Image (tube, helix red, strand yellow):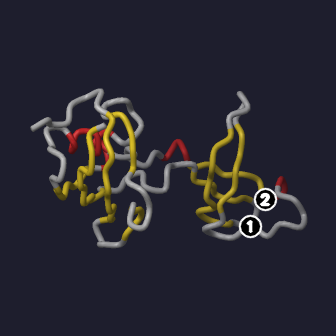
Amino acid sequence: MTQVKNGDRVRVHYHGRLTDGSTFDTSEGRPPLEFEVGSGQVIKGFDDALQGMNVGDKKTVTIPAADAYGESSPENVIAYPISDFPDDMQPEVGMELHMSDNQGNNFPVVIAEVLEDSVILDANHPLAGKDLTFDIELVEII
């Protein structure tokens, strides 16, 4: 029986949960996720979990933050002057915005805090700093 190795294209069903049990993503109701193992298309811990699996195998794996979306970095949290927001915009905690850097790259940020003269923006990935648990089923090695 063929086991998964780097370079294989695979199809998997998955259910991703946080440590509190809440679901953050799932393939339920959708076609299986297809990608090349070891190519960086998915987080490292997910890639690693597939190594050696056979078609039909199911497993549950907990991936530490370092092998998922990394640790949350204070360098990705910035204070932005509230006066630079459009007059007709009322910043609120949890609001998602898009910004661009000096090279023109767009990236998402979330308003973490609204202060009197500034807004605290968090550009960390929403799952940064979190350990993730996945139920994985290997559907096919293509």
- Is 38 on the left or on the right of 115, as rendered? left
Q: Mark 1 and 2 residues: CB-CB less than 8 Å, in contact?
A: yes
Q: Quarter of the image holding residue 101?
A: top right
Q: Nearer the viewer, residue 81 or 71?
A: 71
**What's the residue type where badge 1 is placed?**
Pro
* Residue 132 percent location from the top left of the image: 30, 57
Q: CA distance from mark 1 to mark 2?
A: 8 Å
Discs 1/2, front: 1
Quarter occupied by the N terminus:
top left
* Residue 37 percent location from the top left of the image: 31, 34
Q: What element does badge 2 sit on?
A: helix
Residue drawn at x 33%, y 35% as measured from the top left: 9
Residue to which mark 1 is pinned = 91
- Is 115 on the left or on the right of 55, as rendered? right
Q: Residue furthest left?
A: 1
Residue drawn at x 79%, y 70% as measured from the top left: 90
Mark linked to residue 82: 2
Residue drawn at x 24%, y 50% as measured from the top left: 138
